[in-house]
Amino acid sequence: MKNRNILIVVGIVIILIIAGWWWFSQNQITPSPTPSTTQSQTPSFFPVGAIKDAIQNIITTTANNLQEIIPGERNEIETGDQPIEQIIAEPVADYGFITYQSTSTLFYIEQNTGYIFVMASNTPVRLSNKSIPRIKEVKTAENNSRYYFYISSLDEQNDLIWQKGELLKATSSELALTAMAGNIKALEVSSKGDQVFVLKEVDGTSLGQIMNINLEVPTTVFISPFTEWVVEWVSDTKISFQTKPSSGVNGSIYLLDVKDKSFTPVITNIPGLMTIFSNENNFIYSSSNNGEIISYVKKIKVNDFYNLPNKIITNKCGKIKNDLFICGIPTILPNLNYPDAWYQGLISFNDQIWMMNLIKNTTSLIDGLNLNNLDIINIKNNNQFIYFQNKIDGSLWSFDLTNFDF
């Protein structure tokens, strides 16, 4: 923002100098011209009206600090002093939010120990003393009496396994673990937190079932001969299915309606397809091929899409609310195969933080200081703070949203 203000001041000075030169040249004492019936065909180089409009435009822009001098220029939003804060310096396996002492509260799982902690009044309080090694991710649900943690981790053979952890809210110490089926490929909790979707591989096919949060009363809603899916519960009734992203490999997205079990293609045959949904109607997606990333917003209802000016790896984005996203955008994106090179740890990034508004079709830089060498992943929010991890070291960070008018 400071750089922009400097440019505005410089622009005003330059225009005033030019305006003064024009005014002086127009007001010098010169012989009266010979009357002519033919008007000059050469227009004034700097018409007074144009100069006045330009100066007024700059003054207006400076006053409200929102409008653009150049059409199409992206907004930079002032964030205040040090809006980004490190919450946990040690590696975190995953994190989320649970109701603790009647308040939605941040919890996290230590990577090294597998212990579950909750941040109570900005102080870590250990909820469980059960060590779980090599955790990959955690999904959560809860009822009045207990928390449910659906935990994926790697076994000694590096195979993915799932366990259900139950923690009584009254005691919050002994995490009861139950091994889940060994054929689980993916698990998602509904947006309301009252159901769980489990995708299993059975006899070479995918079987998708919806259960209650205690993983009981399964209802089969999906069967497919294809087994490698990335799933996301995008609304109360819709679950997205995406083929696993890889540079240059054509990918597709489908939507499953859990009520009528319809399975509808959304987009197909996009090389290096990466996506993140806002809701069942709008989503961001990127195409990656030969090191080149192109990003779009797709609007399903009106069957339309538009290009984004940023090159986005969608795993570096998180939804604030419907149609409003925060994304970590690399300052430098070398020509490599994405997202593969990033997944494999062949490259890490130093990200700026951008906001994407899918309704207004705008992108805004909200933090570009790049002082912390952050490779942003796993973005989540509780309507007051954005949280994310640094892929480089697994640390957990926060970004204050309270000063933004959404």
Image: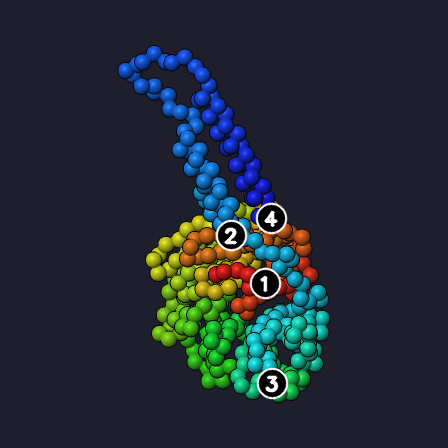
Q: Name the image quarter holding residue 179.
A: bottom right
**What residue is disc 1 on?**
400
Residue shown at 47% from the left, 76% from the top: 192
Distance Cα–Cα, label 3 vs label 1: 28 Å
Give the CA separation, mark 4 to mark 2. Answer: 14 Å
User: Would you call the spot at circle 4 few (<14 residues within 10 Å), some (14-19), or many (20 or more)?
Assistant: few
Quick one: label 3, few (<14), some, or many (20+) residues within 10 Å?
A: some
Q: Which mark is residue 331?
A: 4
Residue at (60, 46) in percent of width and height: 2
Looking at the rendered structure, the secondary structure element under dot 1 is: strand
Judging by the rendered image, the residue that carries numbered circle 3 is 169
Residue visible at 43% across and 14% down in the picture: 30
Left or right: 120, with 273 as reference point: right
* Residue identifier under label 2: 364
Tag 2: residue type? Ser
- Residue 182 in view: no
Label 2: element kind: strand
Tell me the amino acid under the disc marked 1. Asp
Q: Where in the figure is residue 209, as x and y percent of width and height?
A: 46, 77
Q: Look at discs 4 and 2 and give the one toward the viewer.
A: 2
Residue sitting nearer the eye, 179 or 388:
388
Graded by Cα atoms within 10 Å as few (under 14), some (14 to 19) or many (20 or more), the crowding at tag 1 reads some
